[in-house]
């Protein structure tokens, strides 16, 4: 998993023109840690948030909601982040939750940029997709302002949200039909996917169309 997260961070920084650095934050036990970076320099920005136990990456992981900061210099509720990011010439950021099969956030992709104007449409597009659970991608007014890497991120995030919604709906159907809790229902869906030699998303889709 760690090598995949490093690849995600490096790919994001390399493919998305507005992004200068990228990192991935995760919770190890009860401690927030940076598990992947595109460049070692960016660790200082993440760690500034860990010092305060507050910041966009921590909020995104706690809530499962993307957190965009279009003007870091104007953001004073996270003191160390407010000081450290501009010191590295970073003026805008967005933290995007990375979710496991069950839908819970397991990590956060942090994107940091030097150009607030270039980061703004990326932040807006990610938020628009999240607000509509993935359904706003095609109609987002900001997509045409993004480069290919930015569009790939927004489209991928939209697809992930749609998959999460499908899995959650399938779990709720299983709960109702089998009169069980969410954990048991999710396990039943995983077993069903294994038995049909398919992935969790397809198993959820088939269950919704064919029934239990």
Image (cartoon, rainbow, N blue to C red):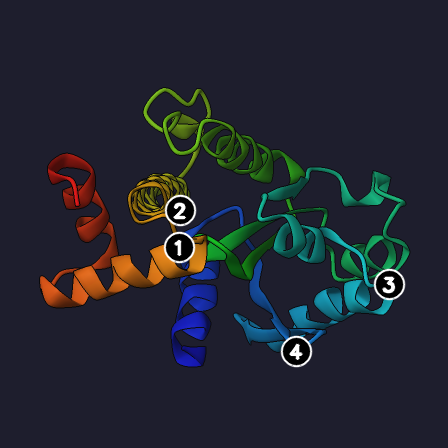
Q: Work out whether 198 lies above or below 165.
A: below
Q: Residue at x 76, y 71 (%)?
A: 47
**Which numbered disc flags the more N-terminal residue, 1 or 4?**
1
**Which numbered disc flags the more N-terminal residue, 3 or 1?**
1
Name the quarter where the C terminus is drawn.
top left
**Which numbered disc flags the more N-terminal residue, 3 or 2?**
3
- Between marks 3 and 2 in the image, the one whose residue lies nearer the viewer: 3
Q: In the picture, residue 101 is in which quadrant? A: bottom left
| Gap in angstroms between the C-alphas marked 4 and 2 | 28 Å
Q: Work out whether 141 lies above or below 1.
A: above
User: Label 3, on which residue?
Assistant: 52
Describe the element under mark 2 as helix, strand or loop: helix
**Which numbered disc flags the more N-terminal residue, 4 or 2?**
4
- Between marks 4 and 2 in the image, the one whose residue lies nearer the viewer: 4
User: Label 2, on which residue?
Assistant: 153
Task: Residue 26: give its label.
Answer: none
């Amino acid at each position: 998993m760690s090598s995949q997260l490093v690849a995600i961070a490096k790919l994001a920084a390399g493919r998305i023109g507005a992004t200068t650095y990228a990192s991935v934050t995760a919770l190890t036990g009860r401690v927030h840690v940076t598990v992947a970076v595109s460049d070692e320099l960016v660790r200082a920005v993440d760690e500034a948030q860990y010092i305060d136990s507050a910041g966009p990456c921590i909020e995104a992981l706690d809530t499962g909601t993307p957190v965009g900061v279009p003007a870091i210099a104007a953001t004073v509720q996270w003191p160390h982040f407010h000081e450290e990011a501009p010191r590295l010439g970073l003026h805008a950021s967005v933290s995007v939750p990375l979710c496991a099969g069950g839908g819970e956030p397991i990590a956060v992709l942090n994107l940091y940029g030097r150009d607030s104007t270039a980061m703004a449409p990326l932040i807006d597009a990610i938020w628009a997709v999240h607000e509509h659970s993935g359904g706003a991608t095609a109609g987002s007014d900001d997509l045409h302002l993004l480069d290919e890497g930015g569009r790939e991120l927004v489209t991928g995030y939209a697809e992930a949200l749609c998959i999460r919604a499908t899995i959650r709906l399938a779990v709720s159907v299983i709960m109702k039909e089998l009169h069980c809790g969410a954990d048991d229902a999710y396990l039943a869906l995983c077993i069903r996917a294994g038995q049909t030699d398919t992935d969790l998303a397809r198993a959820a889709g088939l269950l919704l169309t064919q029934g239990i």
